[in-house]
Image (spheres, rainbow, N blue to C red):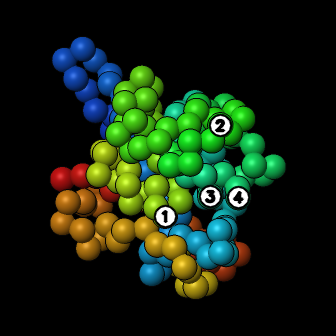
Amino acid sequence: MLCGVLNSIMGSQLLSKKGLRYTMEAIVAVYEDWGIGCCGTQPVALSVDRKFFREMTRGAMVIVGRRTVADFPGQKPLPGRVNVVLTRQGKEIPGFTVCGSPEEAVELAKTAQKAMVIGGGSIYRQMLPFCDSALVTKVYCNPGSDTYFPNLDEDPAWELAEILQSGEENGIRYEMCRYARK
C-alpha cells in the first residue's frame, strides 16, 4: 500500500521546461480540530503516521523550527535528510543548516529536489505560502491542542486532491490526504 502512496506522491511533483524541479510540501498530522500538538509534543501519535512521515521525508530537505527540534530524539537531526532549522536566534545547531527567514529557507530549498516543511506551528504558518502541496494525516480524535495547522478544508486556495490511505490504529481512525494548491 505504501509503495502506491509513494508513486502517487512522486507523480505529483511539478515539472519545468528543464525537467524535474524542486517541490516544497508540508507534512503534518492533525486532529479533528486541526490541532497538531500540546506543550511542544503530539498528544496522540500513530505508528502508521510515523512510518508514513519517515518514508515521505527520507532523502528530502526538511525545514523545521527550533522548538520542534527540541522534541526530536536527543535533539539530533533526522537521519537520511538534509536538516534545516528556521530560527531568528541565529545560533548554530549541530547537524542543522540555520536559516534566519522563510525567504532564506526557500532559496536553500531550491537547491534540493524535494523540500518538506515538518513544523511546528509557526513554521507551518510562515512556510505554507511557499508550498505546492500538503500531506495531511487526519487523526480522528480530539486530545486538546495549543498549536494548530491552518484548516485546508476551509481555505479557498487549497483542495483535497486525494485520500492516499485510510484505516484505524488502536481504535483511532485516520486518513492520509494530499492537498494541492489551486
Nearest to N terminus: mark 2 or mark 1: 2
Q: Amino acid at mark 1?
A: Gly
Left or right of 12 on screen, residue 147: right
Identify the residue position indicated by label 3 in the image.
67
Q: Nearer the viewer, mark 3 or mark 1?
A: 3
Identify the residue position indicated by label 4 in the image.
71
Q: Would you say the residues marked 3 and 4 are in contact, meaning their CB atoms lie under 8 Å apart?
A: yes
Identify the residue position indicated by label 1 in the image.
121
- Residue 42 image offset from top left, x and y in percent: 65, 69
- Residue 7 image offset from top left, x and y in percent: 44, 36
Looking at the rendered structure, the number of numbered marks drawn on it comes to: 4
User: Mark 3: which secondary structure?
Assistant: helix
Cα–Cα gap, marks 4 and 1:
13 Å
Left or right of 53 on screen, residue 75: right
Tell me which residue sits at (59%, 72%) in the image. 37
Nearest to N terminus: mark 4 or mark 1: 4
The reply to whether residue 7 is in sight is no
Tell me which residue sits at (24%, 14%) in the image. 18
Q: Residues within 10 Å of mark 2 (few under 14, many from 20)?
A: few
Nearest to N terminus: mark 2 or mark 4: 4
Q: Residues within 10 Å of mark 3 (few under 14, many from 20)?
A: some
Identify the residue position indicated by label 2 in the image.
92
